[in-house]
Image: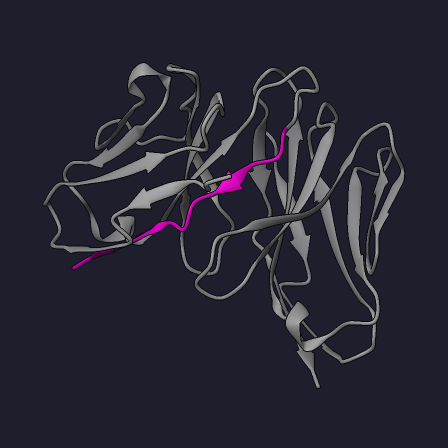
Amino acid sequence: EAGVAQSPRYKIIEKRQSVAFWCNPISGHATLYWYQQILGQGPKLLIQFQNNGVVDDSQLPKDRFSAERLKGVDSTLKIQPAKLEDSAVYLCASSPLDRALTDTQYFGPGTRLTVL
Amino acid sequence: GENVEQHPSTLSVQEGDSAVIKCTYSDSASNYFPWYKQELGKRPQLIIDIRSNVGEKKDQRIAVTLNKTAKHFSLHITETQPEDSAVYFCAASIRTNAGKSTFGDGTTLTVKP
């Protein structure tokens, strides 16, 4: 089974620039998560989709971050404009939604963003 | 919202010794508690999980215990090996049709040969 794919793996931008990250979840996984992981901290949920609907975006800084999951498969996360404090690893994860309500999240390799 | 605290932040043990990492959570509605291992530069990977209707679960050298009354759960690694060195994260979530997880800040485990 192919894992969660993310691109790019690394991105360096200057503050006030824009950046977009892409995630392709495991085939058939209904739930998709975007996390921000700052160095030395645990992953912090930014947004959670179930199919193409938003389940939770309470911690997403909506003045600068946006995310979409078209057709309930791939997802993009955008930051516009970026700030220095956005430097982090952005992790995408997916989980299946089956009769057992499996919660296991499968993480992608992450995108390391550096804002200068 | 849910708050998860994890201790200790760093842990160093000799190879062969046991390691214990503890987490507390705030939302009594949380009913699913996974543990993830993240090696340097790699993605978090699930190593064990426990649901609220179970008090203990074991998988070879790894075990997790849950005390719902006290709202804490622990990861136990026995006979530690150098390859166990990594950052370990606990998480707490409420199982619904799409469970949301809140993560602890991680424990850096170093196993010295």
Look at 72% across and 48% down and name the residue there: B23
Left or right of residue A27, residue A73 in this image: left
Q: Is residue A18 above or below residue A26?
A: below
Q: Quadrant of residue B102?
A: top right
Q: Residue furthest bottom?
A: B113
The magenta span reads A103-116
Look at 86% across and 27% down and name the residue there: B53
Left or right of residue A70, residue B65 in this image: right
Q: Quadrant of residue A24?
A: top left
The N terminus of chain B lies in quadrant: top right
Q: Nearer the viewer, residue A24 or B8?
A: A24
Q: Position of residue B35 (x, y in %)?
A: 67, 47
Q: What's the image's color scheme?
A: one colour
Q: Nearer the viewer, residue B26 or A50?
A: A50
The question of residue A115 being in magenta is answered with yes
Query: For the image shown, how many numbered marks are present on the structure?
Result: 0
Look at 65% across and 72% down and name the residue there: B83
The C terminus of chain B lies in quadrant: bottom right
Left or right of residue A73, residue B12 in this image: right
Q: Position of residue B50 (x, y in %)?
A: 78, 38
The question of residue A24 being in magenta is answered with no
Q: Nearer the viewer, residue B70 or B43?
A: B43
Q: Position of residue A98 (x, y in %)?
A: 62, 18
Q: Position of residue B38 (x, y in %)?
A: 55, 58
Look at 73% across and 74% down and name the residue there: B81
